Each structure stands twice: as C-alpha cells, then as structure tokens.
Amino acid sequence: KNPAYIIRCGNAAIATVQLEQVGSTPQFHKPVWKVCTPQSLIEIATEPQFSVDVTVPEGASVMVNGVAVPVEEFKEGESDVQLDEAAQMYAQQPKAQHVEIQGLFVAPKVLAYDSLGNPLTPSKLPNETDAKQIYCFGPTPESSPDEELVDRVEDMMRAYIDYMANKDEALWTNLGILDTFLVPNSSAYKKLHSITQDINWNNPYTARQDRALDVNEVRMYADNVCTCDVHYDYQLTKNVVNDYIGDMRWTFVKTGTGWNATEFEITGSNDTKFGDDEETEAPAEG
C-alpha cells in the first residue's frame, strides 16, 4: 500500500502527499518511492489576497506565518502610546518599529517577541477576512510592577473617584487633590478640568460604598513612561442605588514629583464615557 503523509504548518494541516512505489533497490530490494503532487487541504487564492501591517516596540522581533521578518525590513513606527506636549516636557516619545508585508496568499499569523524573547500580545486582533491585517503590539505587562508606582496609581484613582462622585460637594477641593496626580496642561488635566460644571450638577449622595479598585496591568514603555490598566467598582445611593463599574487605561510619566498621569481612556464602563469630541460628558450621579 502506498503511504500518505500530512504536511503541517505549526499545528495546522495544510496538505497531504502520497508516495508511490516505483521499484526497489537491486541489492537489498528496498522500495524506491516517488513523491506525488501534494494535495492542498486549505483553499489558497490564485492571486495574493492579504497584506499585514505590524507595529512593535523598539527592539522587538516579528514572525509572519512562521517566518522571521529580517531586521532590515523594519522602519520607524508610531507607538501606541503618544505623549502630548505637556508630557514631553518630562519624557521622550516612546519609539516603535513598523513593517508592512504584501503579497500573502493566506491570512497572516503574526507573532511578536520583545528583546528578551517574551511573547507580546496585540492590543487588538484584526478580522481574519480583512485584506489588510493590522497588528499593534505593546510591551509585556510587568510581572512585578514597582510598588511605589502601583500605590501612586491607587491613590490617584481614589482622588479621581472622589472628584467624579462630588465627595462632600467639595468640587474645587476634590479637583485640587486630583491635580496633584496630573501633569499640568496635559490631555488628562484638560479633560478633567473641562467637566467641572457637569460634576457640580451631580446630586449629593446619602451613601457610598467603594467595592473594588485594582491595578491590573502595568506596561513600561521606558524607565519614565508607562500605562496602567485599572478596574474600579463603587456604588452611590440617593433615593436609588447606582453602580459605577469600569476599566480605564492611564498613561503616566515620571516627573520631578513622581509618577503623574498625562492621558487616560475608558476601556469599559457602564457610565457615560468620555468621548473623543470636544463635548465631554461625565457620569450623572444619583
């Protein structure tokens, strides 16, 4: 019987190939095999259907469909963390590298590794059917983040929640405390100062319960630049009970007074979200 073999790329079976006996060796009568034409197990386009666009931190490496991308193919790219002018008074813009590969017949499988060989996770996965597959990888989350930084983030989040909840109806006092954690005139500073009128309209609450505040991930883009993913959960009562549960990503730079926030985004929330427009709304409490 003529044997058949499966050809794999990684763990995926991509083709079968059969051997056909065409004779035997004269001395030992061992079979002589001919390799037949492989039969594809996947549908491959007759024309290139895909391209891939990959951005990784400086010094990282990339593999596309199991093939390492040569270092010389990379160009300077745009980091997924962009520092505003206020932040760049204290830290340099993080560097990234970028590569674009065209002419792919099958959807690309992209893997990236930092300079130490640790696997990187993309911030967002593209749709498998997109002709242009865009990947953006950030640094590996810190396994043991700096305790001073984590404490600073937790203290800032408490000040942020006090401000958003209009604690003691002391709007300007709460904002003044929050300001001590912000880079002056940064994007975060401007956003939070732009909603004072909305905060002042919030109803005073009769009961408050802080249920959770967790710093889940810290990613270091430089010794003085990082992002922190934070989860919060608190409850306010004024006639009815309102839950405020969400996730935020803050960008911090290290200044002369320590780690201060320069930007933030709401990554998941049951509250009214900050938009990218000029008109920015705060959660209506109570």
Image: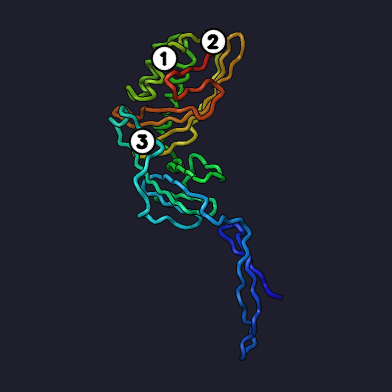
Residue 162, percent across and down? 46, 17
Q: Earlier in the sequence, mark 3 or mark 1?
A: 1
Left or right, 98 with reference to 14: left
Residue 222, percent across and down? 35, 39
* Residue 205, numbered circle: 2
- Give me the residue at 64% from left, 74% from top: 19
Q: Residue furthest right?
A: 1
Q: Which amino acid lies under the numbered mark 3 shown in the image of this protein?
A: Val
Left or right, 75 with reference to 16: left
Give the camera-side residue of 126 and 258.
126
Secondary structure beneath dot 2 equals: loop
* Residue 225, numbered circle: 3
Secondary structure beneath dot 1 equals: helix
Residue 13, percent across and down? 61, 59
Task: Locate the C terminus and report the quarter of the image it occupies.
Answer: top right
Q: Which amino acid lies under the numbered mark 1 shown in the image of this protein?
A: Asn
Within the image, what quadrant is residue 22 found in? bottom right
- Give me the residue at 66% from left, 69% from top: 4
Pointer 3: residues within 10 angstroms few (<14), some, or many (20+)? many
Residue 118 vs 263, above or below: the answer is: below
- Give me the residue at 62% from left, 81% from top: 32
Task: Locate the N terminus and report the quarter of the image it occupies.
Answer: bottom right
* Residue 174, numbered circle: 1
Q: Which amino acid lies under the numbered mark 2 shown in the image of this protein?
A: Tyr
Give the camera-side residue of 16 and 250.
16
